[in-house]
Amino acid sequence: MQRSGSRAVIIGAGPAGLTAAYELLTRTAIHPVVLERSESMGGLSRTVNYRGNRIDIGGHRFFSKSSRVMDWWARMLPMLVRERRSRIYHGRKFFDYPLKFSLDTVGKLGLIRVIRIGLSYFGSVLSPIRPEKSLEDFFINRFGRELYRTFFQDYTEKVWGVPCSRIDAGWGAQRVKGLSIRKTLIHAVKSIFSGRGPDNVHQKGTETSLIERFLYPEFGPGQMWEETARKVREQGGDVRTNAEVVRVLHRDGRITAIEALDRNSGRKVIHEGDVFFSTMPIKHLLRAMDPPPPQDIAAIGEGLVYRDFMIVGLLVKDLLIHDEDGRGAQLIRDNWIYIQEPDVKLGRLQIFNNWSPSLVADPSKVWLGLEYFCDEGDALWRLPDQEMIELGKAELVKIGILRCNDAEDGTVLRVGQTYPAYFGTYERFGEIRQYLDGFENLYPLGRNGMHRYNNQDHSMLTAMVAVDNIVAGTADKSNIWGVNTEQDYHEEETQEA
Ligand SMILES: Cc1cc2nc3c(=O)[nH]c(=O)nc-3n(C[C@H](O)[C@H](O)[C@H](O)COP(=O)(O)OP(=O)(O)OC[C@H]3O[C@@H](n4cnc5c(N)ncnc54)[C@H](O)[C@@H]3O)c2cc1C
């Protein structure tokens, strides 16, 4: 596999594809060719520039429990160290996220509600739902029914567009990991006594949802991936944009070539190779296979569900809510706010100034990202841009965050396949995996490439482990599928930060 003159064809220039290209270049004699459908680098982790104001699609924290990834990022690009602050907005009031047990929380919720929360929590401890089948069961077992309804249900159902009772408990196990009331309390006490310095961003023993500091490229996550692409090209790799993979040719259990549509010229180009990496959505990969997969595999592929995403970038003069300090009213410090208000469609609010001041052209303005979760083609998705911007403004005014005439400019981004869902035909995903694993020289990688709720670090690790296997001459791919399902992502050290 490593003979000189070997070629790797990589579908997609997101974190997984570009990491694969970089790792191949620096560790093997294999020449990588990256085929990217769009014009940008970074996939879901790209940065979009609107009149000098930059949008990070979703707000990407650079944090990993894997020192391999943390070190890789550090070598690639100097980054800012940012403080995390995110809160829940519920009943027109702010609550700390992760939830803190304080007098402030009790005051905002009211004593009766707090008692109900306490009773339902102890009810769940004494008599947990077994077996834990759905995400609803997962939340109730860890937080109690009342707390789940108050703080988790509305936002989670906005994200997925289906009731939590219809989502597999596996999502919670992977995403919320071991977070629970007990751990939240322990975390609160530990952070008081640990005296962590702001430069310690490894925080390895910390639950993913509790991370307090993270790294961030000055100009947004796309900067990391533009830099990686630059280095790949500098070292002789090939990264082609506007190249949409439309056909994956195979014979006798091996991929032989990939056909890509050049979106500039309309021509189709065949790329032959020895090894192939795919980060395109699995549903689309299966459609592109030539000859096509067996009917039942194709049907499972068609039944995979994705949740899609829209973000309204809104430039405003000021917000109605402020942080108070000695200098008077300041811009709130939150990176993002979960909107747990059932009377608006808005799911989450990003305050890009607090990710990096360089995301904002005019520092006297506030640059917001209003996140809406939807299904590609639904009524929200089809709303004309101007109406979508008006909806965003009206919702912020309704929930008391924005004054009526304070918005100055706006833009809308629609992003398909942002969340690979753990429902639809997902429970039969193992059959797709078995089919794809049957192609010895094909490596499905990353988030949609593996239909898994992977963050950048997991996506990168899948690429790194695939290249490890190629270097070692290992055919078994189970360690790649194992990323983000095993504790600490194959890291040996489990030290507390
Ligand atoms: C709202 C949101 C918030 C997030 N927050 C975080 C966070 O805080 N921290 C974090 O680490 N991660 C976060 N993530 C996850 C992160 O965005 C992904 O893990 C990461 O971008 C996945 O990398 P990837 O390379 O697997 O896929 P992608 O980023 O999806 O890249 C795949 C690439 O393949 C291209 N492609 C698709 N089809 C074809 C085709 N047919 N031909 C050629 N090219 C094709 C796409 O254009 C794309 O560029 C977030 C994601 C979302 C949606």
Image (spheres, rainbow, N blue to C red):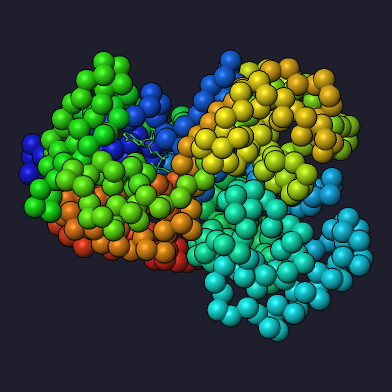
Q: Where in the figure is residue 164, as x and y percent of width and height?
A: 61, 60
Q: Residue at x 57, y 45 (%)?
A: 214
For residue 128, say whether it is visible.
yes
In this view, which residue lies farthest toward the bottom? 126
- Left/right of residue 298 with respect to residue 142 in the rendered view: left
The mark total stands at 0
Q: Where in the figure is residue 11, as x and y percent of width and height?
A: 28, 38
- Left/right of residue 130 with respect to residue 7 in the rendered view: right
Q: Where in the figure is residue 294, as x and y percent of width and height?
A: 22, 55
Q: Quadrant of the C terminus?
A: bottom right
Q: Residue at x 84, y 61 (%)?
A: 102
Quarter assignment of residue 146: bottom right
- Left/right of residue 472 with respect to residue 322 in the rendered view: left
- In the rendered view, tell whether residue 88 sits above or below residue 398: below
Quarter assignment of residue 309: top right
Ligand 1 - quadrant of the structure image: top left
Q: Residue at x 7, y 44 (%)?
A: 3
- Left/right of residue 452 with respect to residue 362 in the rendered view: left
Q: Residue at x 54, y 41 (%)?
A: 375
Q: Where in the figure is residue 251, as x and y percent of width and height?
A: 10, 48
Work out whether residue 455 or residue 74 is closer to the camera in this orientation and state it.
455
Work out whether residue 383 or residue 310 is closer to the camera in this orientation and state it.
383
For residue 66, say whether it is visible.
no
Work out whether residue 120 or residue 168 is closer to the camera in this orientation and state it.
168
